[in-house]
Structure formats: structure tokens, C-alpha cells
Image (cartoon, rainbow, N blue to C red):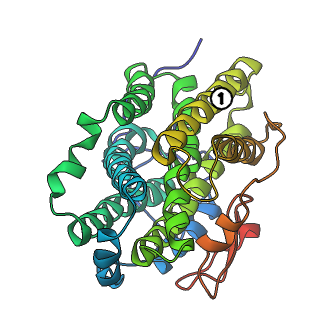
Amino acid sequence: MDGRFNKKIIYNPKSTESLNDRRTFGGNPDGMLNFTKAKYQWALNLWDTMEGNTWFPKEVQMTGDAKDYKFLAPAEKRMYDLVLAQLIFMDSLQTNNIMDNMNPYITAPEINAILSRQAYEEANHSKSYAVMVESISDNTDEIYDMWKTDPMLQKKNDFIAKIFSNLGEDLTDENIVLSMFANQVLEGMYFYAGFAAMYALGKSGKMLGSSQMIRFIQRDEITHLLLFQNLINSTRLERPELFTAELEEKVRKMVRDAVEIESEWGTYITQGQILGFTDGIIKQYIQYLGDRRLEAVGYKPEYNVKHPIPWVDGYASFNDQRTNFFEGNVVNYSKGSLDFDDF
């Protein structure tokens, strides 16, 4: 029978929990955040990386994009607007989801800290999209309302929001673990068709400021992805009995659903009119991501496909940064650094 639990106690002076007793969830912390004593060293390492990667949307020059946008082909303009609308929704959702549906139930203070940092970064991404929209659009409300007015975008958003709503309504051990996986899938799959579409415009010499903004955002998303992959793997060490064959099948279904939803979305936003993208390439790309997400948490791949558009990896990187986005190895960031061996 799954354990059921409440939110952690924030002020808990009677706690006698030792460092070794600390748990990712279901623990009894005293509520104090002590960066000199932590059980999960990967969380401290990740905090330092996230802090070192601090950036601000207004650092990115968008003047050229305002000019480029006026001369985009209709299909390109439509894609750009839809991608922005989708990303606005996703980061708005994640800002609240992390703080309201995940962090209250995590009982390791060092992990609470990086989840709080993630929530800030998600809000910062929303600020980034505001800078992008205000730079190029004559009607900002139209883009901000697309998540309500575009049927395909609404379908995708409804599906994603329902996953987190359902998991949050029934607080069991299994569901908190499934929420970790749901966040891993969200951070590592549901953003990526939109990111690739933006890079396609940049590759053709258009909307370079927007592509640069997405680079900064994706760099943050890599740390968020590492957060949940390490959270899952730490929980597996503490509670191996939860990682049943039934749980694995539920996770695999999450990945299969994400492949279908994100592939359908990629096809919808490109409509076969964006250079370098076909429906088949988009689906294989998302399948490839799904396999990487499964392997990172100890499961065998589902699709066994090759990366169909490896240029995305190079285009997404910074000039002084070497990045293998999908294996989780990230070094030499322009701000901050991350050595995967520390995780």
C-alpha cells in the first residue's frame, strides 16, 4: 500500500532527523537550510552551476529581430508566434508547478533550494518571452492569448496540465515519484520542438536575438533536467521497492505520450514549410529525446533511433561552450560550469 503524506513542516524544532536519515521525500526535516551540511552533494554542485549561469533577458539584443520579423514568410511568422505562445504557457505552468506541486513535499533542504532556484529561472524565462514578444509584436495580447484560442495548442496544454493535476490530487509515494518523472519528461521533451524551430530560423540567419535567448533558456533547462534525473536516481537508492515493473510501464507511457504529443505539435507548427524539418524528422528527434530521458534514469530505450538533426546540438551551444545536451554532459559555459562527474 502506498504511503500517504502531507506537506513538510516548515518550522519543526522538535525534529531529530540526522543527515543520514534525510530523504528526498517522506523525511522529517527541521526546516533549516544549511549549505555546509548536505546529504545530496549533487544538489550543492547544481546550485553553484545555476547561480553561475545567472543571466537577464535584457542582456540579449533584440533590435535585429524586430526588423527580421516584418520580413518573415507567413509560415515562419506563424511558427514563431505559436512557439512563443507555447513556451509562455509552459514556463508559466512550471513556475507554479515547481513551488506548489513539488517543493512542498520534498524533505531535503538542499533539494528545496535548487527547486526554488528553478522556479525563479522559470519566471525569468517568462520575462524573456515578454522581451521577445514586445520586441516583435504589434499585438502582444494575441500571442499571450493563443494558448486559449489555438485548438492544437490548447489540446497540448490541457494534456500536460492534466498530468500534474492528477498526480497532485492523490498524494501517494508512487505519485510523488511519478511527478518526478513527469517533470523530467516536461523539462527534457515538451520544450524541444519549439527550441529546434527557433534554431531553424537562426540557422537561416533570421531572428538571431531570439535564438540567443533560447540558448540561455535551454542552458537553464539542462540544469532543471539534471535536477530531476538526480532526484529520481537518489530516490531509487532510498526507496528501491517503489521502482516496480508497473512504475516503469507508467513512465514509459509518459514518454510515449510525450513523443506523440510533441511530434504532433512539431508537425503543426512547421507544416512542412520550414527548411530542414519533415514530419518524420520531427518525430524521430522527439523519439531520440525520449530514449535519452529513459537511459538517464536507468531504463532501456524505447525507440533505439539515431539523432536525425545533430546540427541542433551545435547551434544551441555557446561559442566558448562544449555541450552534449542529450547525454547530460555540460562544460565550459560562458557563465558557470558543470562537470557531470560531480552528479
Instruction: Say left or right for 45 vs 82.
Output: right
Mark 1 secondary-structure assignment:
helix
Q: Could you tell me which residue is drawn at 65 percent across and 52 percent down?
A: 230
User: Looking at the picture, does residue 88 appear above or below residue 3?
Assistant: below
Q: Closest to the observer: 190 or 241?
A: 190
| Residue 84, image x, y percentages | 35, 55
The picture places residue 245, in percent across and down from the top left corner, at 77, 20
Q: Quadrant of the N terminus?
A: top right
Look at mark 1 in the image and give the residue it sits on.
Answer: 256
Q: Position of residue 68 (x, y in %)?
A: 35, 75
Where, by quadrant of the figure, is residue 189 drawn?
top right
Which of the two residues, 172 or 300, is positioned nearer the viewer here?
A: 300
Is the residue marked by circle 1 packed among few (<14), some (14-19), or many (20+) residues within 10 Å?
Answer: some
* 190 left or right, relative to 251: left
Determine the residue positioned at 34% across, 46% down: 99
Q: What residue lies at 54% left-to-right and 55% top-to-bottom? A: 274
Residue 319 at x, y percent in the picture: 61, 86
- Residue 146 appearing in the image: yes
Above or below: residue 293 compared with residue 34:
above
Q: Nearer the viewer, residue 160 or 271?
A: 271
Q: Name, please, the residue furthest toward the top.
A: 1
Q: Is residue 35 in view? A: no
- Name the amino acid type tagged 1: Arg
At horizontal 71% and vertical 21% (from top left) the residue drawn is: 249
Q: How many marks?
A: 1
Quadrant housing the C terminus: bottom right
